[in-house]
């Protein structure tokens, strides 16, 4: 196999809330206060091949957006390495480092929160390519027009401000800004979540068109399983900072292996006019401050065994190309 | 129909006075909901679906007003009632859940204070009895250890739990009608499924009629009995969920269904509706959907009439995908 365009090896991201002064004093006096640590992303291994679309799904708080940001280089990983075309991004310097950073761009969920409301669209899209020397200041206007046309925006509107655009158009501006520096990989963090269905369809089609035209690789972070099923080649399901299942999209949706994936898929409302009795997955996502021992999913899992409480399951290949972290796969009776 | 419907909305028109003139947010909407029935009110942003919900509760404030039409709750016209009469009904015979539960909950009051207030507002019961009732209501919507949770503040609940508290408050007096405005949109699928299942059973047990306002057709598919599709302030199609989703008559409904990713084959571009929802200030003449519609012709510049067809179905289109003869 050729070198994957991106590979994550044991990537973790911890957020620490340090003790304040009062707590430090209390600690000196013998209290057992500890700094609070959230393991938002916990030991992730993932390889993304060139031209592939990988969907990253999970509930809120599972760490999918944090992982997306680590991949895009916004957060440095606390542990582990992120490799771009085989090279560890943390050890690169100078021109190589910048090239690797520019190659991975991100499209955010809320265009209004990620677009500067006081900049004109031409500046929003054109700023980065000028700073990075991709185009000269003189040519930037023509360049922005070209990028805007590519994402289906009218170049005549380039002097306007973000608030003068509709939600779908703002999403396109966010995409145009990411594309302006000629990335190879685009991380989409819930990029269509805020849009109406008919507009969402337009933006998803745009993503697929751009993939074909520019040979892009996508990491598509979403809580919407329907969207991911449609767009992704492979899907990684996350639960409390860990990947619980990784498989080609079609197989994952046809026959999910991990009990969490099974439950998640069962809950997705389908466009089938059938009165459905919603069989609820019990409980809620546990606090990532105090994740359950062993398999994080065991308190909600209908098949939990004593072993699940004690031992952390590893990501294992259960069929060619399919990975799952579940002890059930070791049980001969269940595997049959 | 033998029995009287719980809710009957007739030719409702809601207008908002703005600097750019009067906008008609709802333009002649009619529908009804029977006892124990679930009606899905579907539309995209700006279609008027939420305003319809608010109008039923009498919550349209200036600069908006109900310009004409009637809203009959168990035969009584809500639009003609005075505020004091409405207050007696709200929370008792009709209730609403909002997208953001913090619209319902007061952040500086404990949950028990708020629930007991809601109970004693409509019922002469002792504080103790009201508290017991509040406790039972929380238990019913699936909140673990309700006794302790009663003494919590709203911010101490997770998003899904907060929505449950709001639902518990809405259902306290077993209302005849519950209007739900996208209550699960902000929630995760697993929590959404829990809430849908609970609302479903509660509505069935109490015989509550439910109007479920949403942009998500797939939620309606699993929950509702009938569906009404709104576009630019009008109901463009109405019928049973099975009929509408399997054989949509209005091109907009068909486009909406086609845009849902899971309805499409992987890798194939999604069928999309070109353009975007029109601004209410600049509605095209006649059918508002015509500029985005592949079937439109010059005739669509006239107002399409309501056409009843099939079994209790209607549409507003000159060129429907299902003709009345074919459906008969």
Image (cartoon, rainbow, N blue to C red):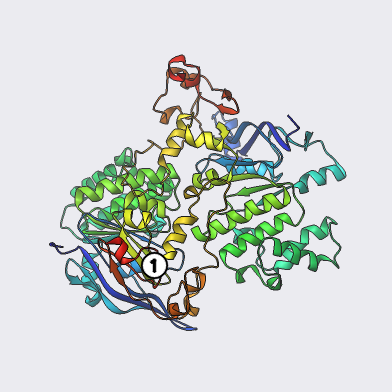
Name, please, the residue furthest toward the left.
B2
In terms of image quadrants, where is residue A204?
bottom right
Identify the residue position indicated by label 1 in the image.
B320
Q: How many marks?
A: 1
Query: Taking A320 as reference, is A159 above or below it?
Result: below
Residue B1 position in % (x across, y down): 16, 63
Query: Taking B287 as reference, is A256 above or below it?
Result: above
Residue A137 position in % (x across, y down): 85, 65
- Tell me what residue is drawn at x 49 percent, y 46 percent: A226
Does residue B140 appear in the picture of this structure? yes
Residue B246 position in % (x across, y down): 37, 54
**B265 horizontally vs A122: left or right:** left
Query: Taking B322 as reference, is B196 above or below it?
Result: above
**Closer-to-camera residue (B243/A107):** B243
Residue B100 position in % (x across, y down): 42, 56
Q: Secondary structure at mark 1?
A: loop
- Tell me what residue is drawn at x 50 percent, y 74 percent: B279
Q: Chain of mark 1?
A: B
**Closer-to-camera residue (A131/B69):** B69
Quarter holding the N terminus of chain A is top right
Quarter holding the C terminus of chain A is top left
**A182 horizontally vs A254: left or right:** right
- Tell me what residue is drawn at x 37 percent, y 50 percent: B163
Q: Residues within 10 Å of mark 1 (few under 14, many from 20)?
A: some
């Amino acid at each position: 196999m050729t070198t994957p365009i991106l590979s994550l090896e044991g990537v973790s991201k911890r957020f620490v809330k340090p003790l304040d002064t009062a707590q430090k004093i209390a600690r000196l006096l013998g209290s057992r206060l500890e700094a609070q640590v959230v393991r938002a992303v916990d030991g992730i291994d993932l390889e993304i091949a060139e031209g592939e679309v990988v969907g990253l799904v999970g509930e809120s708080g599972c760490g999918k957006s944090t992982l997306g940001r680590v991949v895009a280089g916004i957060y440095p990983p606390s542990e582990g390495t992120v490799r771009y075309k085989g090279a560890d991004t943390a050890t690169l310097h100078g021109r190589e480092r910048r090239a690797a950073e520019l190659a991975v761009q991100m499209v955010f969920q809320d265009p209004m929160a990620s677009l500067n409301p006081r900049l004109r669209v031409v500046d929003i899209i054109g700023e980065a390519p000028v700073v990075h020397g991709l185009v000269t200041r003189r040519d930037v206007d023509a360049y922005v027009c070209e990028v805007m046309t590519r994402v289906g925006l009218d170049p005549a509107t380039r002097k306007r401000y973000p608030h003068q655009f509709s939600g779908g158009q703002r999403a396109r501006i966010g995409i145009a800004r990411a594309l302006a520096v000629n990335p190879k990989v685009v991380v989409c963090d819930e990029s269509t979540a805020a849009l109406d269905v008919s507009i969402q369809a337009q933006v998803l089609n745009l993503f697929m068109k751009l993939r074909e035209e520019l040979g892009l690789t996508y990491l598509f972070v979403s809580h919407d399983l329907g969207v991911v099923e449609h767009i992704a080649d492979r899907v990684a399901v996350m639960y409390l900072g860990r990947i619980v299942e990784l498989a080609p999209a079609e197989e994952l949706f046809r026959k999910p292996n991990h009990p969490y994936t099974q439950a998640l898929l069962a809950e997705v409302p389908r466009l089938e006019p059938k009165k459905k009795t919603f069989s609820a997955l019990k409980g809620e996502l546990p606090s990532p401050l105090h994740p359950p021992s062993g398999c994080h999913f065991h308190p909600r899992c209908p098949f939990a065994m004593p072993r699940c409480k004690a031992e952390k399951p590893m990501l294992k290949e259960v069929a060619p190309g399919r990975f799952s972290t579940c002890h059930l796969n070791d049980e001969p009776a269940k595997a049959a | 129909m033998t029995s009287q419907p719980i809710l009957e909305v007739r030719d409702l028109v809601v207008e908002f006075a703005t600097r750019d003139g009067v906008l008609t947010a709802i333009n002649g909407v009619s529908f009804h909901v029977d006892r124990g029935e679930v009606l899905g009110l579907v539309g995209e942003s700006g279609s008027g679906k939420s305003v319809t919900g608010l109008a039923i509760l009498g919550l349209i404030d200036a600069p908006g007003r109900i310009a004409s039409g009637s809203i009959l709750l168990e035969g009584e016209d809500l639009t003609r009632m005075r505020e004091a009469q409405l207050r007696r009904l709200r929370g008792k015979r009709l209730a609403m859940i909002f997208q953001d539960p913090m619209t319902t909950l007061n952040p500086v009051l404990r949950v028990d204070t708020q629930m007991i207030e809601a109970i004693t507002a409509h019922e002469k019961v002792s504080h103790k009895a009201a508290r017991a009732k509040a406790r039972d209501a929380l238990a019913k919507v699936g909140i673990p250890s309700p006794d302790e949770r009663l003494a919590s503040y709203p911010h101490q609940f997770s998003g899904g739990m907060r929505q449950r508290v709001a639902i518990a408050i809405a259902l306290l007096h077993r209302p005849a009608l519950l209007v739900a405005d996208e209550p699960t949109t902000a929630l995760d699928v697993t929590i959404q499924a829990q809430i849908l299942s609970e609302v479903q059973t509660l509505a069935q047990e109490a015989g509550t009629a439910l109007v479920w306002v949403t942009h998500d057709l797939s939620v309606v598919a699993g929950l509702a009995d009938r569906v009404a599709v709104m576009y630019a302030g009008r109901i463009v199609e109405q019928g049973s969920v099975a009929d509408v989703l399997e054989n949509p008559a209005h091109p907009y409904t068909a486009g909406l269904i086609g845009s849902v990713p899971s309805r499409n084959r992987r890798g194939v571009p999604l069928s999309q509706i070109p353009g975007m929802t029109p601004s209410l200030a600049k509605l095209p003449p006649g059918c508002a959907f015509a500029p985005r519609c592949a079937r439109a012709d010059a005739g669509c510049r006239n107002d399409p009439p309501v056409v009843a067809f099939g079994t209790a179905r209607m549409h507003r289109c000159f060129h429907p995908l299902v003709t009345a003869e074919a459906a008969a």
